[in-house]
Image: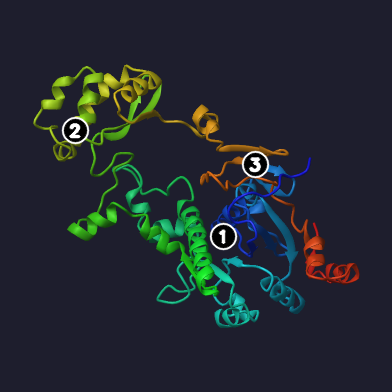
Amino acid sequence: MNAPEPTGSLQGIRVLDLSRILAGPLCSQMLADHGAEVIKVEPPAGDDTRRWGPPFVTGTMSAYHTGVNRNKNNICLDLTTVDGQRLLGELLSDVDVVVENFKAGTLAKWGYSDEVIAERFPRLVHCRITGFGTDGPMGSTPGYDAILQAYGGLMSVNGEKSGPMLRVGVPIVDMVTGIYAFSGVLLALHDRHATGRGQLVDCTLLDTAVSLLHPHSASWLASGKIPQRTGSAHPSIAPYDTFDAADGEIFISGGNDRQFRSIVEVLGLPELADDPRFTTNADRVHNMAVLRDALAAPISTRTRADLAESLLERGVPATPVHDVGEALTDPQVLHREMVVEQDGYRGTGIPIKLGRTPGNVRTAPREQGADTRRILTGLGYTDEEITALIDADIARTS
């Protein structure tokens, strides 16, 4: 089956993806989903995530890797060699955007410092993703998602109050950095329409982690009081928490006084709405533990689906706590096309939906080096030259 033609608002934009692991590949996948032509460059050893399993979808590709590398072409290129670095320059001259997350100084060592890139490729949008940035006290320090969750304060506010600090269960710092990088690339491309010049898009995992601290950062900046872990409860809204229903957990959100009155009426406890301990949200937050105990007993007698339906009918946000399988087979998730299939590939859908220029999923993640010969042909290399490069282990096919 032939792959669908690209659609989306980024058709005509060419992207060189030199990144690996998660934040950079997610950024370039989002660009590809919306129509950009993306060339992913991997070293001979491959992107580490190819081996991050099980599970594996092929003998050489983990499920982890497939989640952020669809809709891309793939070339295997040894950038540590002189010929590889020359090929890199040819690729850079032929694209609009480069996304990279090398250790600080790596591109400069290969002859492509920030100054050289700006001079040789003045229209190029250069998106750089690092852990802590390239300067400052922690500049050039390597960082992974969990390291920055710990360093940036996120881990300190995640977990039960009586338990240990916990890493958020998804690589949220990496993923949001990828989304920020995607946004930064779009901003830089928009500016280029007016100025004709590219620029550096500088994203760090540290900046992302700190940006995600709301509302705890705002609270500390206002009060100087160190925020505490509250489990699934909200530090400044009550009730806003998970509860044990008869058949599992349910999450209930009472974001205002009207919603709180509806909650206690559905639970058969209407008198709580006029209890001076719970009259306003501030009262309920001050008496959160007592309120939770009062609500827990009637909630425990109801099934989560029945109770959620009763609350939703009254305009109260509530939901069963789904596991991943339940979430990915939920009728509304499927209706929103957030699970996609294409020639045997299965993945999550495109979350940014545009009415006139929608993106699409066209190809599964490619095997390492699968497009090397075609890409080098496009750069003007002959079959003999390509074969020589492959034989020299400069540019390889899978």
Labels 2 and 1: the sequence-earlier one: 1
Residue at the spot of label 1? 24
Q: Quadrant of the C terminus?
A: bottom right
Q: Residue at x 60, y 67 (%)?
A: 98
The three-letter code of the residue at mark 3 reads Pro
Q: Residue at x 38, y 22 (%)?
A: 304
Say few, some or many: other residues with alpha carbon within 10 Å of mark 2 (under 14 / 14 to 19 / 20 or more).
Answer: some
Residue at mark 1 to residue at mark 3: CA–CA distance = 22 Å
Percent coordinates x, y for residue 207 in the rendering: 40, 63
Labels 1 and 3: the sequence-earlier one: 1
Contact, mark 1 vs mark 3 (Cβ under 8 Å): no
Contact, mark 2 vs mark 3 (Cβ under 8 Å): no
Contact, mark 2 vs mark 1 (Cβ under 8 Å): no
Between 276 and 288, which is closer to the camera in this rendering? 276
Say few, some or many: other residues with alpha carbon within 10 Å of mark 1 (under 14 / 14 to 19 / 20 or more).
Answer: many
Residue at the spot of label 2? 257
Say few, some or many: other residues with alpha carbon within 10 Å of mark 3 (under 14 / 14 to 19 / 20 or more).
Answer: few
Q: Nearer the viewer's eye, disc 2 or disc 3?
A: 2
| SS label for mark 2 | helix
Q: Is residue 286 left or right of residue 148?
A: left
Percent coordinates x, y for residue 354 in the rendering: 52, 46
Up the image or down, 225 lies above or below 64; here it is below
Colouring rule applied to residues: rainbow
Between 283 and 87, which is closer to the camera in this rendering? 87
Residue at the spot of label 3? 55
Q: Quadrant of the N terminus?
A: top right
Up the image or down, 170 lies above or below 38; here it is above
Percent coordinates x, y for residue 296 in the rendering: 26, 25
Percent coordinates x, y for residue 309 in the rendering: 37, 21
